[in-house]
Image: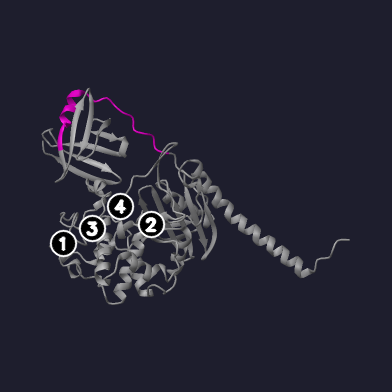
């Protein structure tokens, strides 16, 4: 004879079954969308989705370490690149509320040796909003060589501080890691402590973000993801970078779980007052506030206000997107470059609001090589100065154009237009520009979204 269930036990069983079914109904669509990107070779990492402040989905995909076949998981630690800027901005705002910094004060107030006139004209507000006009150091031709050299904040500032401003401070917007690097040095100057220590004391310890910190290769860091470059089905370990170079602009590591803690803290005044947060989130130019980008997303019948930022650093990609009005969150961390994390984030946010995902986009076809006659190729030969100490030498050999940068090996150039050549080995392109008389006067290096001109000097 079967035992009889009481009505209360039966109700409890039905409620448990209902909750389990609801949870499964929420996780399946997320898993299905991410699976499409994984299958397309466009994602390898960890995802977290929170709805109304509660985590509803968290899962790792692919491998954190290919050499040991270690899978990605919810507690895998990834480099987060420019998501670091959000923490730097928060530290600045905390110091502003303590009276140790002023947003409208010029750089020279805190760094008296910073070159003039920029030091007297650029304010902390300009640095925070990418409106300072300081050239982006990661776009400089010398960056690749400099990125592997041990450095200090003071020493590295000197590598870009004397460069001419791109525009008058406040007049325009140009994303520049240089501004956030300077903010890190200012934080150290006024506190008398290393940036990493201030970060730990002011943010990480209060929020119990035990899986977040300043990434140093020498530190034995459990559950650290390795970064990879991927070309089709071929993988390579990322080149070394000294993390003192990304510094306060991009040197942190974290997990999706810790970034959820960060998100939740932003709904409170534990770190910063409501007025301080309003200043930090408020867009200035191009939708950019203090390390927060404001945009709109059409979700079902409603237009949702979004706050987000992405990040990239050698082999890693990250994106964190919030919908504060509903306390919704999507976080993606990737260790194969993260080229598609922005598209994935929007797709997952759409699913969270009941809209269909668009799915992964097909990779663009590689440009086809064309034939360029020897006479035209010969007009491109010569030396081009992309910086005072960085010269690109262009030569021809057996009908093939080659380029060699200062201190680097020679590489072949593949013509895709009469005046444009790809550099497949470093995912870059060279464009040769002629003057009105038809003589080649400069070359423009297109790489990583940056465009670096170099005048022909020989």
Q: Secondary structure at mark 4?
A: loop
Q: Secondary structure at mark 3?
A: loop
Q: Position of residue 30 (x, y in %)?
A: 54, 52
Q: Is residue 35 above or below residue 134?
A: above
Q: Secondary structure at mark 1?
A: helix
Q: Which residues are magenta?
A: 363-383
Q: Is residue 373 magenta?
A: yes
Q: Which mark is residue 242?
A: 4
| Mark 1 vs mark 3: in front | 1
Upstream in sequence: badge 4 or badge 3: 3
Upstream in sequence: badge 2 or badge 1: 1
| Mark 2 vs mark 1: in front | 2
| Mark 4 vs mark 1: in front | 4
Q: CA distance from mark 1 to mark 3?
A: 15 Å
Q: Is residue 409 above or below residue 33?
A: above
Upstream in sequence: badge 1 or badge 3: 1
Residue under pointer 3: 172
Q: Position of residue 423 (x, y in %)?
A: 28, 35
Residue under pointer 2: 219
Q: CA distance from mark 2 to mark 1?
A: 37 Å
Q: Secondary structure at mark 2?
A: loop
Upstream in sequence: badge 2 or badge 3: 3
Query: Who's the residue at 24% across and 60% down the image?
Result: 153
Q: CA distance from mark 4 to mark 2?
A: 13 Å
Q: Position of residue 367 (x, y in %)?
A: 34, 33
Query: Who's the residue at 51% across and 53% down the image?
Result: 73
In the rendered image, the quadrant that contains the C terminus is top left
């Amino acid at each position: 004879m079967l035992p009889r269930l009481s009505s209360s036990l039966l109700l409890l069983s039905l409620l448990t079954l209902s909750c389990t079914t609801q949870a499964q109904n929420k996780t399946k669509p997320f898993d299905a969308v991410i699976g499409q990107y994984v299958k397309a070779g466009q994602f390898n990492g960890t995802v977290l989705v929170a709805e109304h402040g509660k985590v509803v989905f968290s899962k790792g995909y692919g491998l954190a370490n290919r050499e040991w076949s270690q899978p990605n998981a919810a507690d895998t630690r990834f480099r987060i690149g420019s998501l670091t800027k959000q923490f730097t901005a928060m530290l600045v705002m905390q110091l502003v509320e303590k009276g140790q910094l002023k947003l409208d004060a010029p750089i020279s107030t805190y760094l008296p040796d910073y070159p003039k006139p920029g030091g007297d004209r650029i304010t902390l507000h300009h640095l925070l909003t990418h409106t300072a006009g300081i050239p982006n150091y990661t776009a400089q031709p010398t960056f690749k060589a400099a990125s592997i050299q041990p450095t200090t904040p003071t020493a590295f500032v000197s590598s870009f501080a004397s460069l001419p401003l791109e525009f008058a401070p406040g007049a325009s917007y140009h994303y520049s890691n240089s501004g956030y690097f300077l903010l890190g040095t200012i934080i150290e100057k006024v506190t008398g402590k290393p940036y990493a220590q201030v970060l730990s004391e002011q943010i990480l310890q209060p929020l119990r973000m035990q899986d977040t910190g300043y990434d140093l290769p020498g530190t034995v860091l459990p559950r650290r993801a390795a970064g990879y470059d991927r070309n089709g089905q071929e993988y390579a370990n990322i080149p070394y970078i000294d993390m003192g170079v990304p510094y306060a602009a991009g040197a942190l590591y974290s997990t999706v779980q810790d970034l959820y803690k960060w998100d939740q803290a932003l709904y409170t005044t534990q770190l910063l007052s409501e007025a301080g947060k309003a200043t930090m989130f408020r867009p200035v130019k191009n939708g950019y506030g203090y390390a927060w980008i404001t945009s709109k997303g059409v979700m079902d019948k409603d237009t949702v206000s979004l706050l987000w930022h992405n990040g990239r650093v050698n082999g890693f990609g990250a994106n964190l997107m919030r919908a504060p009005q509903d306390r919704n969150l999507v976080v993606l961390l990737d260790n194969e470059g993260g080229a598609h994390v922005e598209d994935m984030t929007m797709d997952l946010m759409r699913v969270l609001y009941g809209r269909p995902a668009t799915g992964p986009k097909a990779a663009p076809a590689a440009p086809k090589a064309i034939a360029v006659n020897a006479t035209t190729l010969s007009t491109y030969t010569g030396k081009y100065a992309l910086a005072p100490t960085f010269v690109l030498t262009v030569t021809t050999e057996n009908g093939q154009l080659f380029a060699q940068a200062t201190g680097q090996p020679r590489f072949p150039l593949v013509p895709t237009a009469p005046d444009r050549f790809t550099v497949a080995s470093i995912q870059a392109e060279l464009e040769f520009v002629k003057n009105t008389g038809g003589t080649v006067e400069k070359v423009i290096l297109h790489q990583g979204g940056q465009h670096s001109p170099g005048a022909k000097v020989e």
